[in-house]
Image: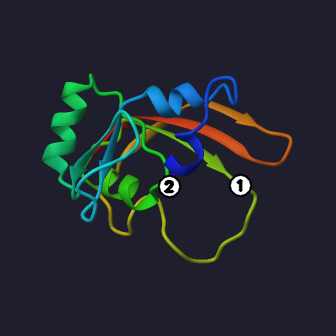
Amino acid sequence: MFEPAWSVRTAEDDPGAPFFNDTPKYVVSSTLTSTTWRNSSVLGPFDPAAIRALKERCGGGLYVSGSGMLVRALLAHGLVDELHLFVYPLTRGGGPRLFAEGAAPSTWSLTASDAYGNGVLYSQYRVVDAG
C-alpha cells in the first residue's frame, strides 16, 4: 500500500521518507511470500504467537498502519498496548468497529489528544487492563 509512493522518495523529497524506507517493516499476509521494499519481510498469515514473538524481539514497540482488519485481530488477541487514533468528522451508521461485538471488556486510559483545524481529532490511549 505504501511502497509505490514511498520507496522512491528521499529525505530531500519528503522528511517522512527515512521513516518509511529505513524502518524495518513486517508484512502480515496469507498471499505474499516475498517483498521488494527494502527493510521488509513477510511474517506470513496472521498468527498471534508469531506476532507475540516479534513484539518480544523488537522490544514491544510495533507500529501498525494501513490495516483495520489486522488491528482488530491484534486487539482480539490482546496484542495491542497503545492506540493512536485519528477520527475524521464523518458520520457512518454501520461497518467495521475497532472492538468486535462481544469482545472481552478492557480498560484504556487517554494519554494524549489534539484537535486539528480540519476537524480531525487525534487521541492516544494506553491499555490499563486487557480484561
Find residue 75 and report its horizontal and vertical position in percent: 34, 51
Q: Is residue 29 above or below residue 129?
A: below
Comparing marks 2 and 1, which lies closer to the viewer? 2
Q: Amino acid at mark 1?
A: Tyr
State how many labels appear. 2
Q: Is residue 115 left or right of residue 104?
A: right
Residue drawn at (36%, 35%) of the image: 81
Q: Amino acid at mark 2?
A: Met
Q: Residues within 10 Å of mark 1 (few under 14, many from 20)?
A: few
Q: Where residue 106 is drawn, which disc sits there?
A: none
Find residue 48 and report its horizontal and vertical position in percent: 18, 50
105, 39: nearer the viewer: 39
Residue drawn at (26%, 25%) of the image: 58
Q: Secondary structure at mark 2?
A: loop
Q: Residues within 10 Å of mark 2 (few under 14, many from 20)?
A: few
Extreme-bottom residue of the structure? 94
Q: Where residue 1 is drawn, which disc sits there?
A: 2
Q: Is residue 115 above or below residue 19?
A: below
Find residue 28 and report its horizontal and vertical position in percent: 29, 52
Residue drawn at (61%, 39%) of the image: 123
47, 103: nearer the viewer: 47
Find residue 74 and report its horizontal and vertical position in percent: 31, 51
What residue is shown with label 1? 88
Q: CA distance from mark 2 to mark 1?
A: 21 Å
Which picture quadrant has residue 33?
Answer: bottom left
